[in-house]
Image (cartoon, rainbow, N blue to C red):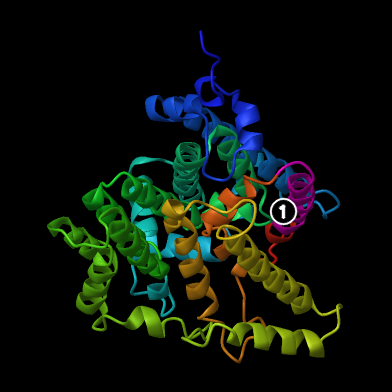
Amino acid sequence: MPAKTPTESPADDKAADEAASVGAESATEKTSAGQSWWPAIRTGVAVWATSYLAWAVVTLFTQFGRPPGKPVGVVDLIRASWWQYDAKIFTRIAQDGYATNPVDPAFFPLYPMLVRAADLVLPLGPKFTPVFVAGAAMLVMYVLLYRLAEVEFGRFVAIRASWALAAWPVAFFLGIGYNESLFIALMIGAIYAMRRGHWWVAGMIGGLASATRSVGLVMAVAFAYEYLRQHGFKWRWNVLAIALVPSGLAAYMGYLWWRLGDPLIFMSAQAPWGRELSAPWTGFVKVIKVLGSQSLAENSTLHNLFDLITVLAMIVLLTLCFVGPWKMRRDQWVMPLLGVALLLFTISFPAGAHRNQALMSAPRFALEIFPAFLLLGHLKQLPVQVYAVVALMLQGVMLAHMSGGGWVG
């Protein structure tokens, strides 16, 4: 009997993951990914539950040393601590629509619509319903992230990528009443559908993404690239599904025209932040100038440093998706290309001159660049350990600061 070749012997999952390049996976992992969603569900629930437990503990610890006040229950304390900034705006929109505050149209409608729907059937109250909706979206997001990573890269990368996202310094924005988790879940779902050639499903999910955040329009870039790649750069009739991607934005503009008389009011509503289209390097120049004129004692200095480091880290991680030992296969480039489009969109709309944080909210927007966390899932041992320790320490500090009413992003 002839000796078996290496390709004939089954590889151990861990050994295959350690030895294979990015994008390679064992036959066992492929079969598992094709047959069952249970690994994705188990890991998603574990990351979701651990995140909420950690956030609750940190939030309660922030009360130590504060002057005693009116007795408040644990749930009410956590709910009040997390109901901050954008979460309040989304709640106001869910309750009163877009006619009560001039800044509200800057916040797209799908998330507050879901909050309104949940509030009609669940007795949770206005401060907790946004958290419930965000938490449900976060659970779906982690399940989809694991599933996509498992199918594309193998289960060990999927596990590490899931925990890497959960460790990000401002990952609590995924579950405390913001729309980040909903938007990320929709993006991952659309990419998953594209990779399987389900173009109408991908288009519909992309339309929901563009109804959640304006940056959802970049899903059209990912759709066009992946469609052409799979069809040998030839058009077929189902390419029309790409028209569904901007449908969410179009529907919102139609509503604004009918309700407020201006379909573009969502752009002018950005005036308090002064965001306008600029060259991608504009924000960097502004931040560097501010850092050069401020001392570390000033509050905005640390924010600017964190914003700048975040953007630079995203650039490095996305670059490593294309070159280096962890680069993705060419047929997987739709994911890092989407990441590049998301990053370019973010840095091309810096805050205005009246703000001294041109890259404000960059750490929160970085959560949406999920391909960077897929890359982190490929790193081994020391880099991952260093990232986890530093990121989790920062997450605790950031959450404690926000729970006390401080601005984070």
Q: Is residue 165 above or below residue 32?
A: below
Q: Is residue 136 above or below residue 30?
A: below
Please name whichever residue, 69 or 60, is drawn nearer the observer in this view of the structure: 60
Which kind of residue does numbered mark 1 sit on? Answer: Gln
Which quadrant holds the C terminus? bottom right
Residue 174 position, x and y percent, is: 55, 52
Q: Is residue 36 above or below residue 355?
A: above
Residue that lies at the very extreme toward the front in this rendered image = 2
Residue 386 position, x and y percent, is: 79, 49
Please name whichever residue, 115 or 397, is drawn nearer the observer in this view of the structure: 397
Q: Main secondary structure of the magenta part?
A: helix
Q: Residues within 10 Å of mark 1 (few under 14, many from 20)?
A: many
Give the residue pinned by disc 1: 395
What residue lies at 38% left-to-right and 58% top-to-bottom? 112
Residue 188 position, x and y percent, is: 42, 50
Over which residues does the magenta segment extend? 380-399
Mark 1, secondary structure of its residue: helix
